[in-house]
Image: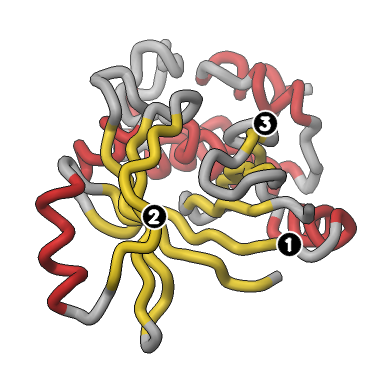
Amino acid sequence: MLFHHLGHATRTLDRSRATLKALGYQCVAAEIHDVKLGVLVEFWHSPNAPMIELLQPADPSSPLVAILRQRSGPYHYCFSAESFEEVGAWVLETRARMLTPPLDAVAFPQRKIQFFGVPDGSIFELVWPA
Amino acid sequence: MDENAVRRIVARVLDLRDEDVDRLTRENCATWDSLRHIELVTEIEDLLGVDLRDEQVASLDSFDKIMSLVGD
């Protein structure tokens, strides 16, 4: 598995942009609307730090609203899988459970993403192999 | 199986008092979201020494159902 990005929940994208810019990040994909997940997302890249996906609720019914009730900030880790066997092995080893079925990745054409919950209560997103 | 052990697990994972778990369901408990459910299921699996199937996991949506599973 390769680390892909850290998912950062924010009430508004605009409120988080200045913080990332001041840390040397640049926006590489702006305001993508993922209708199925109910979020607006942006990807921010830095040569010296992990990629960050900013996520803002797209509407009041977005699942992100419940997460933001707790706090804004990092809330999921995303890894890219190189094979289906790798995904299966990871699920078995971590006892991860599906939070979503595989979904078309709006931000990664031809790829699917899937969210899992793991026993410590944290969230992992996997990008499925092409 | 010690009902109190199960009660303590449910209370701890869901941030409740032990005495508040009776009649608890996913619907009536604000803290029982999908992530807490996974934590809860994992602890029940560890307690019972079993691996639950996805259908069983989905069906454990109340304290009563958890107790029924544990009692089987």
Residue A114 visible, this angle:
yes
Q: Secondary structure at mark 1?
A: loop
- Three-letter amino acid code at the position of disc 2: Ala
**Which one is earlier in the sequence, the residue at label 3 or at label 2?**
2
Label 1 close to label 3 by CB (< 8 Å): no
Q: CA distance from mark 3 to mark 2?
A: 24 Å
Disc sitting over residue A81 in the figure? 1
Disc sitting over residue A121 in the figure? none
The correct choice, above or below, for B61 with respect to B52 in the image is above
Expressed as whole percent of the image width and height from the top left, the position of residue A128 reads 73, 51
Residue B57 as seen in the image, left or right of residue B4: right
Q: Secondary structure at mark 3?
A: loop
Residue A71 visible, this angle:
no
Expressed as whole percent of the image width and height from the top left, the position of residue A111 reads 69, 46
- Three-letter amino acid code at the position of disc 3: Pro
Q: Which residue is rendered at x = 16% and y = 42% of the image?
A: A12
Badge 3 local density, few (<14 within 10 Å), some, or many (20+)? few
Disc sitting over residue A29 in the figure? 2
Pick whichever, B26 or A14, lies toward us: A14
The reply to the same-chain question for discs 2 and 1 is yes
Residue A89 as seen in the image, left or right of residue A12: right
